[in-house]
Amino acid sequence: MILQRRTQPLRTAKPVMTALCGALVALLMQAAAARAADCPRPGTLGTSRILVVDPAQYPRVGTKSFPQTLPLNDKEVVLTFDDGPAATTAAVLKALRDECTQATFFMVGKGAQQMPAMAKRVAADGHTLGHHTWSHRYLARIGFAAAKEEIDRGIAADNAALAGVPSRTPTAPFFRFPYFESTPELLDYVQSKHYAVFGADFWASDWEPMTPEQQLKLLTGRLEAIRKGILLLHDPRAQTAAMLPAFLRYLREHGYRVVHIVPPGTPGRRAAGSRD
């Protein structure tokens, strides 16, 4: 009888949690729709255009790792964030939302599993979700079988985290190797799944400890030198979340434009904040 009394609440816990999760997703989607209606707003950075990235055409991009990158014009930037979701992702989303602009988040599956509401929030805000393995290991050092499991498990967890979000926000067939560390065999495996492999063209080195002001100075200096490209940042880094509003303002005030990348067949390619 004691065991029956203890286990009885567990029989109702799952339906209750399912209902609560469904209600949360609905609220997030309603809030996102309201925010989208406010974009673009005068005086914001916005999103200059949508770029459809077909993995068949662009299998490997980012000049830090590969010869090819995306076809960007002078002063066009693609914003990407790695390693989330995390508590600081909320501040990153707010900064992007305040400027009516879009980014791509390469999520770690373990984090997405632990914080599905945040993963849903990223999707609900209209950002693109790519993949960054299950637990961010050095894939080239753990053997092909273990690395394959890291890739597949991460993708599955990211997709599962978005359960209940409308189909307009699926995860994209975009993948980034942790530490940009791969092997020819792993590159071939990812591409056999019809995924594009992303490197980057420049970054803020935000894995190094520095103040937001130091990071902004470093990043804008690199931006002025390269003038366009895929930018790598990390949304779990508090210094990046604190720096981001000033960086987005810098882009706006210096004539830079944000390009939002999406996979082929994405419904509603014109995202909130677009300035086509």
Image (cartoon, rainbow, N blue to C red):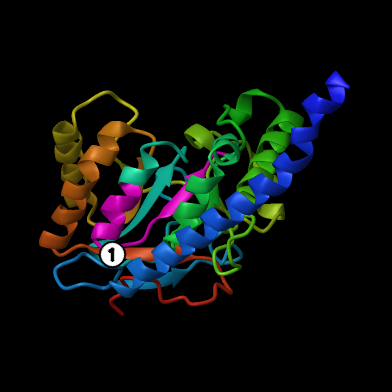
Query: Horizontal placement of 64 versus 256: left or right?
Result: right
Q: Residue at x 16, y 73 (%)?
A: 42
Q: Residue furthest bottom?
A: 276
Instruction: Please tell me whether mark 1 sits on a helix, a strand or a loop.
Output: loop
Q: Residue at x 70, y 54 (%)?
A: 193
Q: Which residues are magenta?
A: 92-108
> Is residue 102 one of those drawn in magenta?
yes
User: Can you say which quadrant of the picture contains the N terminus?
Assistant: top right
- Looking at the image, which is closer to me, 47 or 165? 165
- Looking at the image, which is closer to me, 84 or 225? 84
In x, y percent, where is residue 18?
Answer: 66, 50
User: Can you say which quadrant of the picture contains the C terminus?
Assistant: bottom left
Mark 1 neighbour density, 10 Å: few (under 14) some (14–19) many (20 or more): many
Query: Horizontal placement of 161 versus 7: left or right?
Result: left
Q: Is residue 189 visible?
A: yes
Q: Is residue 133 above or below residue 260?
A: above
Q: Residue furthest right?
A: 1
Residue 74 figure quarter: bottom left
In x, y percent, where is residue 213?
Answer: 14, 35
Q: Residue at x 59, y 51 (%)?
A: 21
Q: Is residue 195 above or below residue 169?
A: above
Q: Which residue is mark 1?
A: 100
> Is residue 122 one of those drawn in magenta?
no
Q: Is residue 60 visible?
A: no
In x, y percent, where is residue 17?
Answer: 65, 45
